[in-house]
Amino acid sequence: MNTPTNEVRILTDEVLRTKAQEIREVTSEERALAERMVKIMHAHNGVGLAANQIGVLKRMIVVNPYFEKGKEVVLLNPHLVLLKKRCTDTEGCLSVPGIAAEVSRAYRVEVEALNLEGKKVRFTAEDLFARILQHETDHLDGILFIDRLSLAGRFKIRAKLKTLLRGAKPRRSKKQ
């Protein structure tokens, strides 16, 4: 069953391919979720985590581009405007363990979201911060980084992907 856990969902879990729902009101439940997500992200040495990666279909991400506890950024209902300049860099994902590949993304993004106080925030992010925001926001739309790979990029990871898929058990269940 797709109930929220402290476990990061893996590739074959259908919740990762499901679009998350907008958060209409910031409550103690959302604040508790954000706190739990930050702990899970750090426990897995991640730099970002989307709520659906732990089985919660809410549009919330936590990111830590500074690699420091206490410097995390929590965003609800993030909306990104991708700016034209692109760059390619290696990405991995907690939900696709053991696989990393080159992904082309916007170098700079404009972000509009809500913070945990329910206030609208707007800012511009660049480089790694922008990449993490794009990666985590993709999760909220049911998109994984492997979906963004070029044909050549998919070819390079096919053996590892087959191994991962062989070892992963499909999870089908109730979504929150």
Image: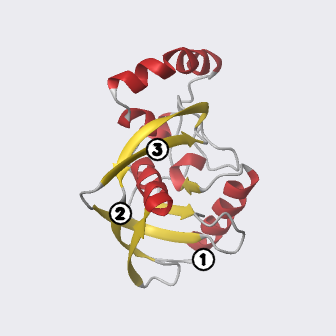
Q: Which residue is drawn at 49% across and 62% down?
A: 129
CA–CA distance between discs 1 and 3?
37 Å
CA–CA distance between discs 3 and 2?
14 Å
Question: Observer-nearest residue: 65 or 172?
Answer: 65
Is residue 87 toward the left or the right of residue 37 in the image? left
Question: Observer-nearest residue: 15 or 150?
Answer: 150
| Residue bearing the label numbered 3 | 89
Is residue 60 toward the left or the right of residue 113 in the image? right
Vertical side of 112 occupied by 153: above or below:
above
The part of the image, by quadrant, that contains residue 37 is bottom right
Task: Say which amino acid is labelled 2.
Answer: Arg
Q: Residues within 10 Å of mark 3 (few under 14, many from 20)?
A: few
- Residue 108's disc is 2
Q: What element carries label 3?
A: strand
Q: Is mark 2 on a helix, strand or loop?
A: strand
| Residue bearing the label numbered 1 | 28
Task: Say which amino acid is labelled 1.
Answer: Ser
Vertical side of 13 occupied by 119: above or below:
below
Mark in the foreground, 2 or 1: 2
Q: How crowded is mark 2: few (under 14 residues within 10 Å), some or many (20 or more)?
A: many
Residue 54 at x, y percent in the picture:
60, 49
Query: Going from the N terminus, do you reach mark 1 or mark 3 first?
Result: 1
Residue at the farthest right position: 43
Residue 72 at x, y percent in the picture:
61, 70
Residue 86 at x, y percent in the picture:
31, 51
Tell me, yes or no, whether the two marked residues, 2 and 1, touch with CB atoms within 8 Å: no
Q: In which quarter of the image is the N terminus?
A: top right
Q: Residue at x 60, y 74 (%)?
A: 31
